Amino acid sequence: MNFTDALNSAWRERNSLLCVGLDPDPERFPAHLKGKADAIFHFCAAIVDATADLVCCFKPQIAYFAARRAEDQLEALIDHIHRQHPATPVILDAKRGDIGSTAEQYAIEAFERFQADAVTINPYMGHDSVAPYLAYSDKGVIILCRTSNPGGSDLQFLDVGGERLYERVARLVSTVWDTNGQCALVVGATFPGEIARVRTMTGDMPLLVPGIGAQGGDIEATVRAGRTASGCGLIINSSRAILYAGGGEEYAEAARRVAESTRDAINCYRHSG
Amino acid sequence: MNFTDALNSAWRERNSLLCVGLDPDPERFPAHLKGKADAIFHFCAAIVDATADLVCCFKPQIAYFAARRAEDQLEALIDHIHRQHPATPVILDAKRGDIGSTAEQYAIEAFERFQADAVTINPYMGHDSVAPYLAYSDKGVIILCRTSNPGGSDLQFLDVGGERLYERVARLVSTVWDTNGQCALVVGATFPGEIARVRTMTGDMPLLVPGIGAQGGDIEATVRAGRTASGCGLIINSSRAILYAGGGEEYAEAARRVAESTRDAINCYRHSG
């Protein structure tokens, strides 16, 4: 099944827009895992198994694995998700961006080596830097549009002739680059008005929204701004608030409780008002 | 020694602005290396040993290693360069770009795991996405500015209020982000007028120029546009034209011949006219 269909099925069948981000930081692991072989895999796999029925997808962040020479554990983790939770797509958060011949290598890394269903990509180098990922027609290509970090406005908010740079990216992706219905956009949760703007420009294109905690206020504004007519269209990511909800041996159960309450908080606003 | 000082020494002592890009594609390896264990390492190490006295730095492209699960060979290669050619800085071409907490992980990957002297970075997410690399004050941070691929103009050439987006990046980096003299910019070889523009805006900041072959025309225009008053300031990269100059067992000698002629072609224009 291709990424878009799998995502649509997961939204519907799980009744969830929640994505759990897998950003494993061994310094924050419970004491019983510290020093254990393949601790990163075991920490993440327990989170996955405790939350899979509550989410529309998982999003491992490759930097946390690469910093610790743990690419093998990332391979094992994605394989675990595919085997144990086969209806749950995996987004590899890598934010790659390079010329075509190099992008072909990164696409092999994401889709063939790691077997991700989708990958995040940086648009700064333009269309031919994205095309090698799009050539995998069953995969999702999730392009940075508007990020909610403090420096996100340094370039993305510049006026490029009547619209902001992030609006240009949204327009380019939805009207030119995405000829196969396989693209999505990253739009941070900090600016609901901008989520609404991107939603208006992109029809029903999925939006990956990072930067949300378990706080209902941000969730309400984000969901109202970004939902489609059918109450879907959003991949709302939470990482640290879920991964590190509990500090002890019961961390996976604690993660499940926060994931469940976050899913429910999101669902309050998908169809109301 | 920090990256900037090491680069300045290498420019002067080797009398070379040439950077050899290490983009190892096993399909293009000589027959005697195919199927050999650690072929990627051996291929690259032979190129390094044959050309080190002709270059100012080496630039391995991480995608080629990651696509083949060969991070261990990349570690070994950079270690080999540091041990055998200690005055030759290594730029890890990774073009990373993410929020601060994730950028910290990527900085660990580049500088602590791989022991690179500098890394390439994407500016789309703004200053705080670059700051974690700058925190390694002895390392080089080389930021994408103007790329020469076909889609490079999709965003970089947009008018952002009297200047192009790539000019804004050059201005931000040189006047705001680079408080420690450790930044450089990537400016493609296709547009010498734009190299000249960036040179005017950035004083003596090093410019990494990819996209050049062994053709004298491009080299002349690039060097005249980008050189500093002292005839330095450029890291002129050539990858495939050098790596794959010969197809047989003598590939390293063939690479050396092309590297030497490219270095010499560059040197023709560093101080003339």
Image (cartoon, coloured by chain):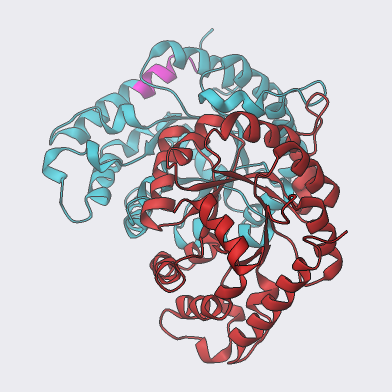
Chain colours: A red, B cyan
Foreground of the two, B2 or B58: B58
Residue drawn at the location 55% of the way across and 30% of the way down: A127
What percent of the width, then of the height, locates residue B183? 63, 41
Asked if residue B56 is among those painted magenta in the image, a careful observer would answer: no
Q: Residue shown at 46%/76% (left/top)?
A: A41
Q: Quadrant of residue A167?
A: top right
When asked about the image quadrant of residue A197, the answer is top right
**Residue A42's x, y, as percent?**
47, 80
The one nearer the camera, A37 or B237, is: A37
The vertical placement of A89 against A170, above or below, is: below
Q: Which residues are magenta?
A: B262-270
Residue B104 visible somewhere in the drawing: no
Image quadrant holding the C terminus of chain A, namely bottom right
Point 73% across, 44% down: residue: B177
* Residue toward you, A78 or B145: A78
Residue drawn 38% across and 24% down? B263
The rendered magenta stretch, by its main secondary structure, is classed as: helix
Q: Residue B210 at what x, y percent from top left?
A: 47, 29
Q: Please count the marks in the image.
A: 0
Quadrant of residue A58 within the rendered picture: bottom right
**Where residue B166 appears, x then y in whole percent?**
68, 28
Compared to A246, does B156 lie above or below? Answer: above
- Tell me the quadrant of the picture where the N terminus of chain A can be found: bottom left
Is any atom of residue B129 visible in this view? Answer: yes
Apparent side of residue A209 relative to residue B161 in the rendered image (left or right): left
Measured along the vertical axis of the image, is residue A16 above or below residue B80? Answer: below
**Foreground of the two, A81 or A249:** A81
